[in-house]
Amino acid sequence: MLLEEADAVRGVAEAIALTPDFAQCVAAILSLRGRVVVTGIGKSAHIAGKMVATLNSTGTPALFMHAADAIHGDLGMIQPEDFVIAISKSGDTPEIKVLVPLLKRKGVPLAALVSNADSYLGVQADYVLHAPVTKEACPHNLAPTTSTTAALALGDALAVCLLESREFTSADFARLHPGGTLGKKLYLKVGDLSRQNQTPQVLENAPLKDIILEISGKRLGATAVLALADGHLLGIITDGDLRRMLTNFTRLEDVRARDIMTPQPMTIDVEDFAAEALVRMQSRNITQLIVTENGQFSGFIHLHDLLREGLV
């Protein structure tokens, strides 16, 4: 079954190369002032909905219109500057035959995403996006399987060509996906998270009691160690450093921060992406990073911050 559907997608690629319609359709959509309205019925309606979602998320404003609902009022959503894509395997369903004349009367460009280019829809359309399918993967050749896969792939190809033509960037994608994990990886900065945390810090001559109180009180499992003279970052003390200290020192009252800190700790800038913080934590098998701003200590980012945002 999967190989049959894969062969069908290859057939779609070959069909696109045979006519200029696909390229002309891309050019027409790029010049639009309006929106792309995608319509279909049955399983084609589900493919249309997915195509609309993909177009919207990649910089092409789009709307879904169910072909059956269109003739009961939804046709009003189509404006003179819009572009319509109708999806139908056969291109000859009753709903499509009723809808097409109404679309032609509105004077909007019409593209047909069809398996049968010689169908009613294919002949009436201004552009034919040909997705040829000779047989469904369904053993009875009934359930839409291969045909919907081919239509889905062709819709994705259209969206990607539009994306590339618009020079749509990952930053543009992030602006349209602020709530999703993909978007967060592209826009969420370290400073957005670290500024919500406390900033545990001690001077290099701080005694053990102050170090323990700072780590336990600020609840990040570590504290930065700053220079007494000018406050620049010297090192980090973690819970692990405190445990190791017990095997190395006998007079705990003499211990100072500089004695047990890890010098030159890994840091990350407030303007770096939060996803990069995860990469650095994983590379060192650690759970927190010191955050700097203009080279100076600014705070901490913890693995829990990244978990909370769904980046892990």
Image (cartoon, rainbow, N blue to C red):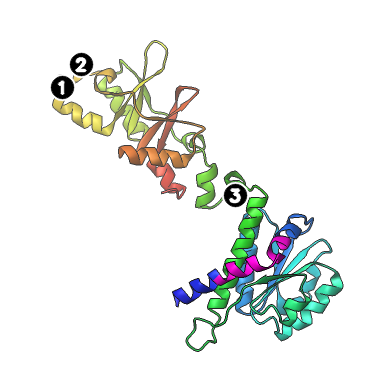
User: Can you say whether 282 is above or below 203 in the image?
Assistant: below
Asked if the residue under mark 2 is in contact with the one under mark 1, i.e. CB atoms within 8 Å, the reply is: yes
Q: Quadrant of residue 285?
A: top left
Considering every residue shown, the one lying at the far top of the view is 229
**Disc 3 packing (10 Å; few <14; some 14–19; many ≥20):** some
Q: Residue 149 in the image: x percent, y percent?
A: 55, 72
Q: Identify the element where label 1 is drawn.
A: loop
- Of 26 and 94, nearer the camera is 26
Residue holding disc 3: 173
Q: Residue 283 in the image: x percent, y percent?
A: 33, 39
Q: CA distance from mark 1 to mark 2?
A: 9 Å
User: Can you say whether 46 is above or below 59 in the image?
Assistant: below
User: Can you say whether 85 is above or below 288 in the image?
Assistant: below
In the image, the segment drawn in magenta is 11-25
Q: Residue 219 in the image: x percent, y percent?
A: 36, 36
Q: Nearer the viewer, mark 1 or mark 2?
A: 1
Residue 249, disc: 1
Q: Nearer the viewer, mark 1 or mark 3?
A: 3
Using residue 116 as the reference point, say whether residue 71 is left or right of it. right
At 58% from the left edge and 51% from the top edge, which residue is drawn?
Answer: 177
User: Can you say whether 293 is above or below 48 in the image?
Assistant: above
Does the stretch in magenta take in 172?
no
Residue holding disc 2: 254
The residue under label 3 is which amino acid type? Phe
Using residue 212 as the reference point, say whether residue 196 is left or right of it. right
Q: Identify the element where label 2 is drawn.
A: helix
Q: Quadrant of residue 207?
A: top left
